[in-house]
Image (cartoon, rainbow, N blue to C red):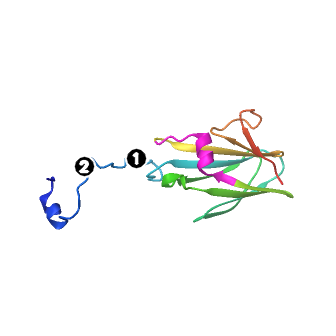
Amino acid sequence: MGANPELESLFPEKKRVRNPIVPIVILSQNRNCYYFEWTINFYDGVQDSPIDVHVKSKDDDLGHHTITYDHGWPFGFCEQFFERTLFWGHFTLGSKFVSFNVFDKEIAKIIGRNISANNMVHWLLKQDGYYLSPEFKPYDDPAWMFRGHWQ
């Protein structure tokens, strides 16, 4: 019947499954992720105006970070199975503010997933709103995808 008679004698009532699906586990070099590894980057594209960045998930509060023009703040994580990972951010620029999901399954689809690499998401905060890109580009590059306005 099976390859291990000792186990079968312990659990005779269990049916054996032929050719079970075995998950493939690829570990990243940095975080030992069992799924996709991500780094989210935020950049301040507004001269002489620092931006307060506050990112959270259901389980983690990453705190407040102040980014300044031409500088940014990154954070990394391992995505959960079944596309359940969600991070959202609150951003303040002077009297303006905005909140939006900085990572969810929609963002991952737009960016694209690569199991063998650290996937990158780039957010650029400018005077007129916030922009998304799968790769870093100059701030004036038209390839940045506009995602919304400040409130």
Residue 5 numbered tag: none
Q: Nearer the viewer, mark 2 or mark 1?
A: 2
Q: Quadrant of the C terminus?
A: bottom right
Magenta stretch holds residue 124? no
Pointer 1 local density, CA inside 10 Å: few below 14, some 14–19, many at least 20: few
Residue 93 x, y percent position in the rendering: 82, 55
Q: Along the horizontal axis of the image, is 11 left or right of 136?
A: left
Residue 142 x, y percent position in the rendering: 75, 32
Pointer 2 local density, CA inside 10 Å: few below 14, some 14–19, many at least 20: few
Magenta span of residues: 101-115
109 or 73, nearer to the observer:
109
Rendered residue at 55%/48% (across/down):
38
Rendered residue at 67%/54% (across/down):
101
The answer to whether marks 2 and 1 mark residues whose Cβ atoms lie closer than 8 Å is: no
Rendered residue at 23%/58% (across/down):
15
Rendered residue at 72%/39% (across/down):
145
Q: Quadrant of residue 12?
A: bottom left
80 or 120, nearer to the observer:
80
Residue 26 numbered tag: 1
Q: Determine which residue is flagged by label 2.
A: 18
Q: Along the horizontal axis of the image, is 56 left or right of 127?
A: left
| Residue type of the residue flagged with mark 1 | Ile
